[in-house]
Image (spheres, helix red, strand yellow):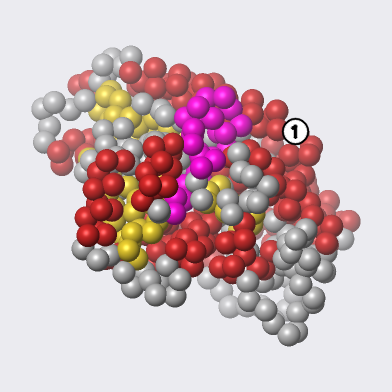
Amino acid sequence: MQALLDQVGMRLVAHVGSLGDQPASDVADAAKLARALVRPAPEAPGDIDALLSLLFDRVIPKSYNAAGPGYLAYVPGGGLFVSALAQLIAAGVNRYTGLWGPAPLMVQLETNVVRWFCDLVGYPATAMGVLCSGGSLANFSAVVVARRARLGDAFQNGVLYCSDQAHHSVAKAALLAGFAERQVRHVTSDACQRLPVARLRERVQADRAAGQQPFLVVASAGTTNTGAVDDLAALAEMCAQERLWLHVDAAYGGFFMLTERGCARLQGLERADSISLDPHKGLFLPFGTGCLLVRDGVLLRRAHAVQADYLPAPADVDEFVDFADLGPELSRPSRGLAVWLPIELYGWAAFRRALDEKLDLAAQAAEALRAVPAIELVAEPQLSIVAFRLRTPTLDAAAADNANRAWLARVNARGRVFLSGTMLNGRFVLRLCVLSFRTHAERVLQAIEDLRATLPEATQS
Ligand SMILES: *Cc1c(COP(=O)(O)O)cnc(C)c1O
């Protein structure tokens, strides 16, 4: 075991130590190389050194460097090394945390983490939550809780609402929770990509007048496209008046609550009935940790608890929890340690500083881009995403989109940063999302340099 740990440790430390020097992405010839890996399961044992070489020299480098400082695409996180070590410990000791009885103190550490998150969003002592695999699963369970709490068993006429900027996992959650596509309303967002409260209320009232049962609004606290934050306070007010469940998808934006600016932008979050968070984004954990919080925790348990004769005696629910009663899983990884160790080790202050830095960096990137005449900002950062495109007054929509796609490809081909694009109001735009704890000012400057250096020749400034 010690020898294996040493071998793996050497490789891993060398890899993580050189993340900043590795290309921001390299997936050239991916299909060919992937096909070359196909082989039947071996009957005979393999050689650990050869297998680690295969992994670290051939397999891992062929990827987007999602852990590196140049990853400014989609929603980064980075993957704290200490959290990876906590995952190793959790898997190494392999305790059973689906229920309280088999590992009550491990469960308590995870319960502490959930309580810290509840405190962060301003939830009362009656709130409960559960760590799951990611934001998608958190959104799924949220829809199930809202359905059970507000519609009961007959939900054929139930209608749920989100903006056209909501993450696609919301529509997927609705489908998985038993709703047909016709029961999901995507309300057109406003000029700042926010859910327009007045328009939403009209839709709700019209649906109700037509015999439907509006029951749930899913708001975004940081959309994936542009980081737009819906007016949570106004939505909470409206949902209270219309007797709707308010779920806030804060998978990307939630942990900005650690910062003053985040608290101001997410004002009203504490009034939501439920909240999705993604520690593998805003807390920089390795992939595999999401979280659902429910303000009235009893409703979370009521939506998920099912008993069985062969299980250990249930926990005393007034004081402790069986996580299996709060989500779809029974056997599960002990997710709490991966959150608990970094927070205990570094303290909230370190996360607060890192997230404040990301807000600053996005604002600086927006300012630098605004100063380039050939570039048009299409979404100012509300959190740490800025969306922009080329000014193309002489091109039609299709040609402009192509020019922007080609520009994105040229930037990414330089290998220092990796950006992604999206569609906004039917047009292709580039977006830069700063969230990794490994991304600092120097790398954002490189992004700006590379964006300028790869402008179409006619527009170079
Ligand atoms: C990332 C994201 C999700 C999905 O979370 P996963 O962890 O990828 O499952 C949902 N909503 C928003 C706003 C996100 O940014």
- In the image, is residue 422 part of the stretch drawn in magenta? no
Secondary structure under the numbered disc 1 in the rendered image: helix
**Residue 414 appearing in the image:** no
Quadrant for the C terminus, please: top left
Q: Bin the neighbour count of mark 1 within 10 Å (Cα to Cα): few under 14, some 14-19, many 20 and up.
A: few
Residue corresponding to mark 1: 347
The outermost residue toward the right is: 2
Q: Position of residue 237 (x, y in %)?
A: 41, 41
Instruction: Give residue 139's position: percent from left, percent from top.
Output: 48, 56
- Residue shown at 13%/26% (left/top)? 393
Q: State the residue in front, 95 or 112.
A: 112
Q: Is residue 441 above or below residue 82?
A: above
Residue 356, quarter of picture: top right
Q: Is residue 289 above or below residue 266?
A: below
Label 1 near ligand 1 (CB < 8 Å): no
Q: Amino acid at mark 1?
A: Gly
Residue 80 in picture, x, y percent from top left: 68, 41
The answer to whether residue 215 shows anywhere in this view is yes
Q: Quadrant of residue 95?
A: bottom right
Q: Residue at x 59, y 54 (%)?
A: 296
Whether residue 265 appears in magenta in the rendering, the answer is yes
Q: Tell me which segment is drawn in magenta.
A: 245-271
Q: Quadrant of the N terminus?
A: bottom right
Tell me if residue 380 comes above or below residue 300 in the rendering. Answer: above
| Left or right of 277 in this view: 208 | left
